[in-house]
Each structure stands twice: as C-alpha cells, then as structure tokens.
Amino acid sequence: MLKFENVSKVYEDGFKAVDSISFEIPKGELLVLIGPSGSGKSTTMKMINRMEPHTSGKILINGKDTNSYVASDLRRGIGYVIQQIGLFPHYTIEKNISIVPQLNGWSPDKIKPRVHELMELVGLDPNIHANRYPKELSGGQQQRVGIARALASDPEVILMDEPFSALDPITREQLQGELISLHKKLNKTIIFVTHDMDEALKMGDRIAIMKDGKLLQLDTPEKLLHEPAHGFVEEFIGK
Ligand code: ADP
Ligand code: MG
C-alpha cells in the first residue's frame, strides 16, 4: 500500500535527516515508528504527504509515485494528527471537523450528519460537544477532535506524529485503547510515531526503529523482543 524505496532527505543546510530507508506497509496495518529525538521520524512522515519533499529515492502509494500526484489530491488521501493539534480556537468543534468536507465541496446537509458520526466514532457526544469551542474541551477530547478531523476526508493513510505525548498517563492509555479499537473497526493504514517503547509494543502490528536517519529494524513486537537486531532495543525497553 505504502512503499519507501531508498528514500533520503537532505535539508537545505546540508543535514541528512533520513538516510536511504526502504520499507513497505500493507493496507490496514498499524505501523509504529519509534526512535530517539532527532532520529528522522517526523521528517519521514512529512515526506509522505510532500510537506517536506524527499531528496532521493521513491515513495509509492498503491504503486503510484507520490511525486506524480497533485499535492492537494495526495493530501486528501492522507490524514494527519500531531501533538499540537492546531484546532481553530474561534470555531466550534463541529466547524473544526467540517473544514475538510467543506473544502472537498460537500453540501452542508451532508456534512452535519457525517461530522456527528465522526464525533461518535472517536467517543465524543455530538449533543454535548458539537457547539463547544476547543478551549472548553480537555486535552484528550481535543486530541479526539484531531483524530475525527483527520478521518473526515476518509483518507487511505493516517499519519500520527506523537499524538498522545502531551496527555496525562491515564488519558493517554484510554486513547491508546480507543485508537486500537478504531483501527480494528476502520481497517485504515496507520503510521504512529512515538518515542515510548511501551506504547509501541502495545499498539503496533509492527514496529520500525529509526536512529540517526536510518531504519534499524522493522518487525512484529514479539520478534523485536526476542530477536532484537540491535542493542538499541534493549536500551529502549530497559533490559
Ligand atoms: P524526530 O521526529 O525523530 O525527532 P526529525 O525528523 O524532526 O526527528 O528531525 C531529524 C533531524 O533533522 C534532526 O536532527 C533535526 O534537527 C533535523 N531537521 C528537522 N527539520 C529540519 C529543517 N527544516 N532544516 C534542517 N534540519 C532539520
Ligand atoms: Mg518528531
């Protein structure tokens, strides 16, 4: 479904943030990308929707080179959730989630039921939350809005860059569980970035480990624990 072929990223200042990585994700997989700060995780995510163009190699979605898409079409197929969700503070929750369907030219009578359905999907009650403003919601609820918004264009791929790292431990665990259920239900391809190995082991169908821009290992949680290809894994899980 998503394929990286020897993809590298050299920033304008000459720094090589991603160094010739190759991997493939089948449709419906939840892949966790883990690695220390500065290892190139966010850069890898940004290259998928061309927010940061890659310098060399190829990125393919369903066999098609991402460079051959019109950027807006490419981005419509990719939902993005980040730690700083960036909800519009002066828009209600309903309006915040409606932005994408509106941009896609949906008629207002179709948008409202769709937005309410999305809210229910992420555990928000439309009767209570639709007309509230972001600051009236807790951090976890705001993050749920971010997920609903990312799902609004019915994307094929969802990229989540440390979406839960600013949340308190209890809310975080709650949202992890909810995302696992949501993933089972929707069967979307998800790449989830974290630097927390417990979170990675809990959530990932497979886990990819990055360090210094390189992909060190990509395996199932079981394989990773029992056959770590690199000392870094033990270091991470504290063995
Ligand atoms: P991670 O998400 O794993 O913490 P990033 O992908 O954000 O890592 O960054 C990888 C490396 O690239 C870091 O060393 C970072 O400083 C560098 N980097 C990120 N963005 C830029 C940029 N716009 N220009 C130059 N270097 C950058
Ligand atoms: Mg990052």
Image (spheres, grey):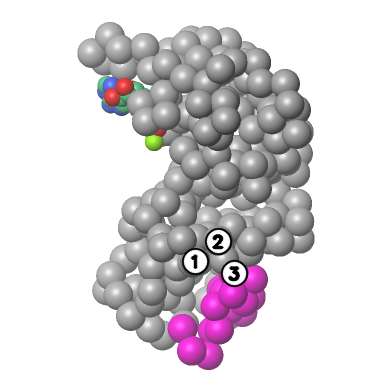
- Three-letter amino acid code of the residue under disc 3: Val
**Residue holding disc 3:** 122
The part of the image, by quadrant, that contains residue 24 is: top right
As helix, strand or loop, the secondary structure at mark 2 comes to: helix
- Three-letter amino acid code of the residue under disc 2: Glu
Residue drawn at (59%, 15%) of the image: 230
Residue drawn at (51%, 46%) of the image: 160
Count of marks placed on residues: 3
Who is closer to the viewer here, 42 or 152?
42
| Whether label 2 touches label 1, CB < 8 Å | yes
Residue 89's label in the rendered image is none
Q: CA distance from mark 2 to mark 1?
A: 5 Å
* 185 relative position to 165: left or right: right
Mark 3 residue crowding within 10 angstroms, few (<14) / some (14–19) / many (20+) = many
Q: Does the beta carbon at disc 3 come under 8 Å from ligand 2?
A: no
Who is closer to the viewer here, 36 or 82?
36
Q: Which residues are magenta?
A: 112-129
**Residue holding disc 1:** 170
Residue drawn at (70%, 35%) of the image: 221
Q: CA distance from mark 3 to mark 1?
A: 17 Å
